Image (cartoon, rainbow, N blue to C red):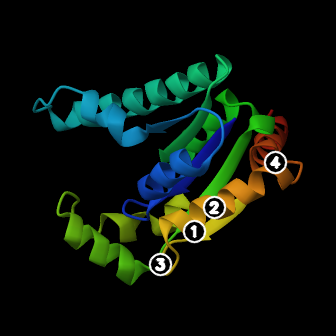
Amino acid sequence: MIIFLNGTSSSGKSSIARELLRVLDEVWFHLPVDAFHAMRARRDLPPAEVAAVLRRTWQGYHRAVAGMAAAGNHLVVDHVLSEPWRLRDCVELFDPEETVLVGVHCARAELERRERARGDRPAGLAAGQIERVHAHGVYDLECDTTDRSAADCARRIKEFLPVRPRPTAFRRLRDQERDRDRDRG
C-alpha cells in the first residue's frame, strides 16, 4: 500500500509521515521526494539543463516508489504535485487500488510563517504552489495542518485506511486520463 501525501512545501507532509511511521501497524517506509533531491550532487548547472535534471529526478523517484511497492513494501510518500505530468506519471505507475491519495492543506499565512521559521526555502514557494498542487481536486482524504497536529492527521489517516471507499482517487484519476486519451485519439 502507498499512502501518498500531496501538499505544498511546508504544509506538514513530512511531519505527518513521521507520525504515520510511529502509529501504523506493520513495517512502513517513508520515501520523501526531498530525499531524492538531496542525493543529487550539488553542481552549478546551466539554466537550460536544470529542468531536465529535475524532471529525471522526479521520474526516477516515481519509479523507485513503484518498485518498492511492487516488492510488497508499505510506503508513505510525500510529494508536491505542482505540475500535472507528475500526477499523470504516478497514476500510471502506482496500483490505483493500493494507493491512498491524501491532500495536505494549510492556510497561506501559516505556510509563510513555517517557511520563515525553516529558513531553507525561498520565500513564497509554498504560497505559489497552493493552486497548482491541488488543481486535480480528487482525494481519498484531506487533512488541514493549520490547526491540526501531524499526530492528529496521522491518526485520522490510520483510521481511514480500513474503510477507504472505492473507487479510489487514483482509480478515478486513471479513468479520467484514459477518457481524455480516448477523446483525443
Q: Nearer the viewer, mark 1 or mark 4?
A: 1
- Res. 181 in view: no
Element carrying mark 1: helix
Image quadrant assignment for residue 44: top left
Q: Residue at x 44, y 62 (%)?
A: 12
Three-letter residue code for mark 4: Thr
Label 3 to label 2, Cα distance in Å?
A: 16 Å
x then y, percent, for residue 85: 55, 41
Q: Residue at x 51, y 61 (%)?
A: 132
Q: Secondary structure at mark 4?
A: loop
Instruction: Please tell me whether mark 3 or mark 4 is closer to you in this view.
Output: 3
Q: Nearer the viewer, mark 4 or mark 2?
A: 2
Whether pointer 1 and pointer 2 mark residues with C-beta atoms closer than 8 Å, the reply is yes
Counting residues from the start of the chain, the first of labels 3 and 1 encountered is 3
Q: Quadrant of residue 185?
A: top right
- C-alpha distance separating marks 4 and 2: 20 Å
Say left or right for 95 vs 46: right
At horizontal 50% and vertical 50% (from top left) the residue drawn is 17
**How many numbered circles does the render carry?**
4
Dot 1, crowdedness within 10 Å: few (<14), some or many (≥20)?
some
Give the quadrant of the N terminus. top right
In this view, the residue farthest toward the right is: 166
Residue at 21% from the left image edge and 71% from the top image edge: 117
Tell me how far mark 3 sits from mark 4, CA to CA: 26 Å
Q: Which residue is mark 4?
A: 168
Earlier-in-chain disc, 4 versus 2: 2
> Which element type, helix, strand or loop, lies under badge 2?
helix
First in sequence: mark 1 vs mark 4: 1
> Residue tagged by mark 3?
146
Location of residue 174 in the rendering, given as x and y in whole percent from the top left corner: 77, 40
Residue at numbered disc 1: 152
Q: Nearer the viewer, residue 40 or 69?
A: 69
